[in-house]
Image (cartoon, rainbow, N blue to C red):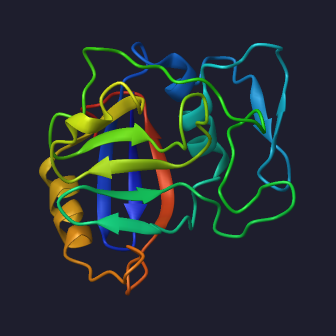
Amino acid sequence: MSVTLHTSLGDIKIEVFCESVPKTSEVQAPFTAFPTQSHGFQLLTPHASHQNFLALCASGYYDQSPFHRLIPKFMVQTGAPANPTAENPKGGQSIWGAPFEDEIRPALRHGGRGFVSMANKGPGTNGSQFFITFDKAPHLDGLNTVFGKVIGDEGLVTLAKMEAVEVDKKSRPKEPFRIEKVTIHANPLAE
């Protein structure tokens, strides 16, 4: 399974590791969560904990989401809502409206440029935010759930453009860029 983040700086295609981290990534058929008008979610099954990232992608949740944190030679972060509301707060949330547990897999590491991982504030605090690495980040192994990797040259070129954006003292890009929309692909090698 793969997705393409269509950003204001170019496309980034991501292979999503559905089998390794199902809670973080997978959407099962039939789709068991659906967006409400405010991009919140109503669950149709009691334990549909395996579909957060792709369910948020499918719902349009990430559309217009800004890349709000950028640390050159480390990572770029996104996934907070573009227009926060009481139901969908500034920091974002999972499809369950509450944080969910980590899915740490020893084989999945922050091993270089282009790894995609959940952003969190400690164990069991995953929501909607995620980051993409610019380089190895072994200090995050065992702390953040790696759930994907950038595939294809176009995504790496887009990452280079992002990394070149100047930031302020709080690591915020001085020239804003965002996810415009997301396309979901069934085959990671599909165009």
Q: Which residue: 51% across, 17% down?
A: 22
Q: Is residue 21 above or below residue 135?
A: above
Q: Can you tell which quarter of the image residue 150 is in?
A: top left
Say which of 188 and 100 sits in front: 100
Q: Which residue: 76% across, 29% down?
A: 33
Counting the numbered discs, the total is: 0
Q: Can you tell which quarter of the image residue 167 is in?
A: bottom left
Quarter of the C terminus within the rendering: top left
Q: Is residue 117 above or below residue 176?
A: above
Q: Is residue 188 above or below residue 112?
A: above
Q: Is residue 45 above or below residue 62?
A: above
- Residue 8 percent across, percent down from the top left: 39, 73
Q: Which residue: 38% across, 79% down?
A: 173
- Residue 71 percent across, percent down from the top left: 29, 65
Q: Which residue: 68% across, 39% down?
A: 94
Q: Can you tell which quarter of the image residue 114 is in?
A: top left
- Residue 10 percent across, percent down from the top left: 30, 67
Q: Is residue 89 left or right of residue 116?
A: right
Q: Is residue 158 left or right of residue 123?
A: left
Quarter of the N terminus within the rendering: top left
- Residue 140 percent across, percent down from the top left: 32, 36
